[in-house]
Amino acid sequence: MSYETAIICQGVSKSYDLYNSSAQRLRSLIFGAGNVKRFTALKSLDVEIKKGEFFGIIGRNGSGKSTLLQMISGIIPPTSGHIRVNGRVGAMLELGAGFNPEFTGRENARLNAQILGLSNADITAAMPEIEKFADIGDFIDRPVMTYSSGMFVRLAFAVQTAINPDILIIDEALAVGDIFFRMKCYDRLNALKANGTTVILVTHSSEDIMYYCDRALLLDHGNVLFCGDPTEAVNRYYELGHISAPVQSKEVIAYIDQNDGEIHIDGAVLPVEWPIGGFSSMVPGRQTGDGKIVCMAIRMQDDAGQAKNVFRQGDTMHLLAEYRAQGDIGTPCGGFVVRTDKGVVVHGRHTAQTNAAVPRSIRDGATIRVVHELKLDVSVGEYVIDLGFSSFPPDVYGRQNAIPALELEGTAARHSVVTAAINFSVVGKTGGGYSAQPFYGLAGIPSQSHLAVAGKSSDA
């Protein structure tokens, strides 16, 4: 193994025998495996991780990430292949692993440090830094059975990083920490990396993979799908399971009156042609409201009319929703809300706020089609969309610009609300530098920055 290489995995795989009962397990131990089913958690992996590299591993649940980390840590052996590790390994694989619940935090810290090979003198020297970083106050001298999950992580991370391991493995442990602790952890990880420590991070946070990792490995059902640029790994991760549906035929229409069969435009020409295929059906039981409007189908597509669930930052999404009237209503209003997977509202809008041309009223049996366009200047991640449909008294809606918004809202009738109607993913832009990271945070708010040098001019 090269001095510059921290870990080499060659043809590594891991399989488990699946038993239906303990009796079957006992029979297989005595008489052989027989008809025991076999599950392969990881299949023939080849990867080399360099010394001082920040290496990310991503994938859906059950893809083999934790299995790989356990083999690198020496907890379980591979079924086939070889793993070579150069250096002392520190690992945070499971919350509270290696901690005796009846010991105090200080006692557990000393015990873990001893297991990792530190002398008593080294442990005594490291304890002040461990206490300072963990920042759990008097709980350091209380049994860890009294700790919250956040305290567990604080203490475990403080111990593992204070010993300056050659290789540090973290399996989703930072997910339970608050944002301030996570920022402190990544500052510490970057400092370790600068001193030559290899950091291996397993996480579902695409932002952490893109911003901190030098390379990333994408696993799916035990298979290696990609190893390389973190942004590309994240893009491929989000594309897993998202299949674009073809556009079959098109027509331009605002709504169809089922009673007289006529097409009513009322000046409301939709900005896109309406496709026939690629819609997701909506279940009426999932909808709330008075029932006079029912959402029938929804579809997301790009500027080219291609149905999709994965977009790049800066793309424009066309959100198409089809409704059916089950009673006469006034002036219609269709809206949407975009939320993060944690429920935070990113953006919401409806047709009344955009002064969209809409019919004065809708009759029972009509099909209403609504198109929302939104530019996805948001962070990389997964999002859900809520749909809503309401109506206003025609005479009130005709005076909407002369009436306070609260008064308008008070006259609206809520006909249909569909929570989490559909989900989509946003992946990063291709390319390097800040062209692939146009802003920080959740959304790209229009902003400008200017710089000037006062006094003596700077060097060119």
Image (cartoon, helix red, strand yellow):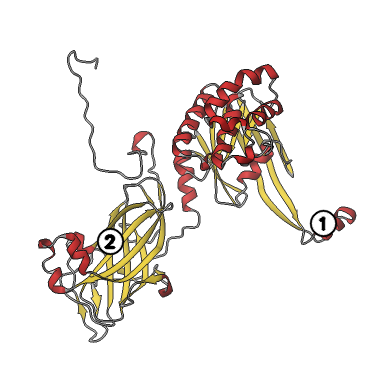
Q: Which mark is residue 25?
A: 1
- Residue 320: where, in percent of width, then height? 32, 65
- Which of the image's four quarters has the N terminus? top right
Residue 247 can be seen in this image: no
- Residue 290: where, in percent of width, then height? 32, 75
Report the residue that reaches farthest toward the bottom.
Answer: 260
Which residue is drawn at the image coordinates 15% and 73% (left, top)? 394
- Residue 445: where, in percent of width, then height? 27, 43
321 left or right of 164?
left
- Which of the image's four quarters has the C terminus? top left
Which residue is drawn at the image coordinates 30% and 43% (left, top)? 444
Type of residue at label 2?
Answer: His
The quarter holding residue 261 reads: bottom left
Depth check, mark 1 against mark 2: the one in front is 1
Q: Which residue is mark 2?
A: 372
Type of residue at label 1?
Answer: Arg
Q: Using the image, determine if residue 433 lies above or below residue 369.
A: above
Identify the secondary structure beneath mark 2. strand
Q: Using the image, determine if residue 416 lies above or below residue 206.
A: below
Front position in the image: 116 or 104: 104
- Residue 348: where, in percent of width, then height? 29, 56
Q: Using the image, determine if residue 137 lies above or below residue 20.
A: above
